[in-house]
Amino acid sequence: MPLSRFSKRHERTFGKEKEEWNGDFRKPPKPDSYYTKIKGQCRWCGNMIVNEDGTINERRSWHEECATEYMIIYHSREQRAQVRKRDKGVCNHCGKFAMKWDVDHIKPLVEQRDVKEEDLDWDYYKLDNLQTLCKPCHRLKTNSEVILKKNVKKKRKISYRSLKKFK
């Protein structure tokens, strides 16, 4: 169940037409079922929401687990709340309790850049890919990722130049 609540600032999208994904790897596309017009159908997984007696619950539009997963992916406040509840503020790298901490993606989201909608790896956006890092450890990890990214770009340039020579 989401730890933060839906509020008036959340856009009402029930029954709206599907929006085209703009390719922003930080906000993945929403599933087709998100734009459903059927009452009682979960907007995340697309399955019907069933009461204990087996009837369809037309008053709800989310399973609790689906609402939590959606909120973790699309709302950073919920991400922080869930990671805080799980890790209790202890840095995943150095093991120290930190009053000031960051939520970090273990596998960096930037790896999803330029990936087509149908090829997205949804594991990058789940709670299992999030960790608590204190500010110094997060800075170290981010700097090492920047260096790795630069090396990858250099390799691309070198291979592109070498290909040009052979043409």
Image (cartoon, rainbow, N blue to C red):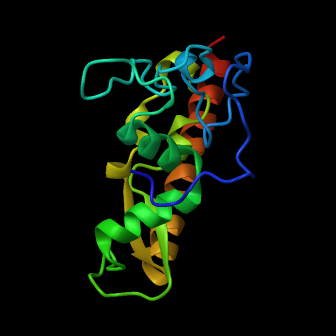
User: Residue 69's spot in the image, x, y percent?
Assistant: 43, 42
Q: Nearer the viewer, residue 126 or 15?
A: 15
Q: Is 118 situated left or right of 14 in this image?
A: left
Q: Quadrant of the C terminus?
A: top right
Q: Is residue 144 something that shows in the picture?
A: no
Please tell me which residue is depicted at 26% across the width and 19% down the height of the picture.
Answer: 54
Q: Residue at x 37, y 79 (%)?
A: 89
The vertical placement of 87 against 39, above or below, is: below
Q: Quadrant of residue 7?
A: bottom right
**The furthest residue to the top:** 167
Q: Residue at x 72, y 36 (%)?
A: 12
Q: How many marks?
A: 0
- Residue closest to the eye, 38 or 31: 38
- Residue 116 visible: yes
Q: Is residue 12 above or below residue 34?
A: below
Above or below, 133 against 146 in this view is below
Q: Tell me what residue is drawn at x 63 percent, y 36 percent.
A: 157
Give percent across and percent down for residue 110. 56, 44
* Vertical side of 145 occupied by 69: above or below: above
Locate residue 156, reporting x and y percent. 58, 35
Give residue 116's quadrant in the image.
top right
Left or right side of 31 for 82: left
What percent of the width, then of the height, locates residue 60?
Answer: 49, 31
Nearest the viewer among 56 and 147 is 56
